[in-house]
Amino acid sequence: MTGLIRFAPSPGEYAAMALAGGAATFGAIVMFGSRNPLFLVAAAIGGAGLVFAARRPVFALAVIVFIEVSNLSGVLDQYGRIPVFQASMLLGVVTIGLALREPELRGRLNAWTAICAAFAGIFLATQLVSVVGSVDVATSLASARRTAIDLVFLLIVLMLTQMTGRPWLVAAVFVVVLAALSVLTVIDQVVYGGSTSFGGFSIVTTSSGEDVTTLRYGGPLPDSNFWGRHLIMGLPMAAALLTRSLRSFQRPVALAWGFSIVALLAGIYLTQSRGTFLSAAIAMVVWFLATERPVRRWGLVSLPLAFGLVLVPGVGNRLQKMFSEISQGPNSGHIDPSLLGRLAAQQQAGLMWDERPLFGFGPGTFPGQVFNFAGRVATAQLEAPDGAHNTYLSLAAESGLLGIIGWVAMVVGFLAVLLMRNTAQPRSRDRVLVAALIAAIIGWSVSSAWLHLAYFRTFAVVLAMVAAVAPALPMPAEALRTFWRAAGAWLMAGVVGFGVCWVYLVATGPSKVQAVQRATLVPAVPTDGWYAYALDIRSRMQMLPTFAVVLHDEKSPVSIDADSVRGLLVFTVEADTAAQARDEVQLAVAQAGNRLSDSVGFNQYVLQGIASMQMTEVRDSSTVVTGIGLGVAAGLVIGLTLSSVTARRRRPEEPLAVRELAAVSSG
């Protein structure tokens, strides 16, 4: 019999554990040989443990979540192709098969199981349709296969979480693993100076960044940005666990969850990822908004602390510099190389989407198409990106509008289930967890605007918790009406916010005229046998940036940026009128020619213009930021106001059956 609590093996289990351990040992001999007895012992223990865990769904669920969140399979890859993930999937399938024999566990699966499976199926269907017209069918089939496996993993964790009724356990394991790994990164930085990786669980990444104050840690992942995206999801869940323990007057437990929040914040800081900083802040704001009013008051009280974190070196100054660099445009040679690389990849993905807007080039084909698009975008980079660095542009490039619709249908579908739970049971003790899941999904989605779709299974663990906290079916008619009123209110708020932003930008209009003149360096005269070398200015990557600094006049408003990939110097200025912009650029080019002659002499290089000057109307960056800010503020005010009006229309007390159900589900 499968048990939720029972831990001691029954007599019949010993034989099954021995049989599974022997089979696993034989498989290890086939895969690794008998030269390493450690693998054989681990295989025997793993096989026996699989049988042991499969008879205990709660334990199996905790093991599966631990393996995925800790990226154990990826860490152990350095020691050989150990099938940790495959064993985790097998454990889930066997556990579900055994649990389905129990009426109590089987009865917890309901219509939400099928609905959530349908959400995942919609996304998978869009990927399979995009394979049909792929430019590389083999690559797209492999990508679709990986997507299908990831979605099967999602359904396995979802069903186990539902059958055990332990979403809080999943959240606790999720947070504990992330907090423990964050502590390892702190120890690695403070004690060892980044010289040890703790077996691969505290990796110092090779990512560069301007004004970073520490080494950049990726935890068990090779990229600090993706590790930060995981930590973003853990932060609101840790806050929910802290709130729950405080309400239960469990002070030691509350202290532990408070420490986990500090550890996660330290881990986020050690990523030195500006996108992670912003997304984590947005996730916590969403959590405070989605939870009940007493918790929101604590959010207002914590605002000074939040502003204080901005003053920490490596946070506020890096964010401010990022915004200033982005406002300079893609031609600036002074922008952080990591930002330029992402911008180039996103432009390439956008161009791919423009050429195949409906079905894209096929799942997984972006890296193979980079060479066709790298030279056609404004931002040039020598290193080919491994992804579009934007989940949505990546989906658009590879599976077109159809893929975006499938992804949005899946993510918004899971979010809608959580919002229905908040609407149907607004006073439930699980509301803080529901709000944490909403914040985790939104935080991950915001962070994905700078990252492509990778390590989806960790995000799938969060999605898998949704069915376990979904509202009871059938939902009361009043709850459904309240949900649709709230959805309509926020939809109207979004429309109003967009309208305010659009009206402001239309009213202000393009305030500047930008003039751009491209030029290059050519040898003044054919030098004896060295003309080809003198003409080659692109392979010497530091040459053009050096000349850009030498030729720039600090008193001139014209910027000179180096495009070393194409071998160009780009003169750019913004002025109030086209004539003023043209005159400024022409004067700057003439002065640069004189400076060039003074610096290297008349017989070395001359400045030669490329094509004609380009004149475009542009908006001042501050105007765009102001418009977006006004739109967001207007949307929030309208949304909160309409939500407050909707809340007053609710009945003062929930039906007794709903209260009893909320008590059972939270217990």
Image (cartoon, rainbow, N blue to C red):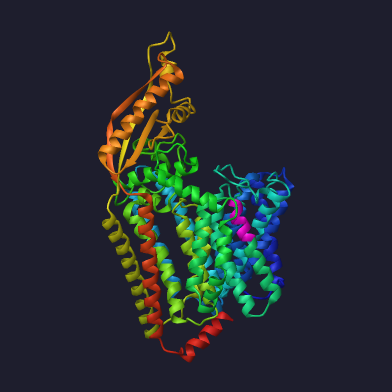
Q: Position of residue 419 (x, y in %)?
A: 43, 74
The stretch of residues the image draws in magenta is 263-271
Where the C terminus falls, by quadrant? bottom right
Q: Is residue 1 magenta?
A: no
Determine which quarter of the picture holds residue 642. Answer: bottom left
Front one among 197 and 59: 197
Residue 380 drawn above or below residue 504: above
Q: Is residue 265 magenta?
A: yes
Which residue is situated farthest in the top direction here? 528
Residue 148 drawn above or below residue 533: below
Determine which quarter of the picture holds residue 381. Answer: top left
Determine which quarter of the picture holds residue 171. Answer: bottom right
The prevailing secondary structure element of the residues shown in magenta is helix
Front one among 627 and 226: 627
In the picture provided, is 161 more to the left or to the right than 201? left
Q: Is residue 162 visible?
A: no
Count of numbered circles in the view: 0
Residue visible at 49% across and 40% down?
337
Q: Position of residue 598 (x, y in %)?
A: 43, 19
Q: Is residue 207 visible?
A: yes
Where the N terminus falls, by quadrant? bottom right
Q: Position of residue 415 (x, y in %)?
A: 43, 68
Residue visible at 37% across and 26% down?
591
In the picture provided, is 384 more to the left or to the right than 19? left
Q: Position of residue 616 (x, y in %)?
A: 28, 42
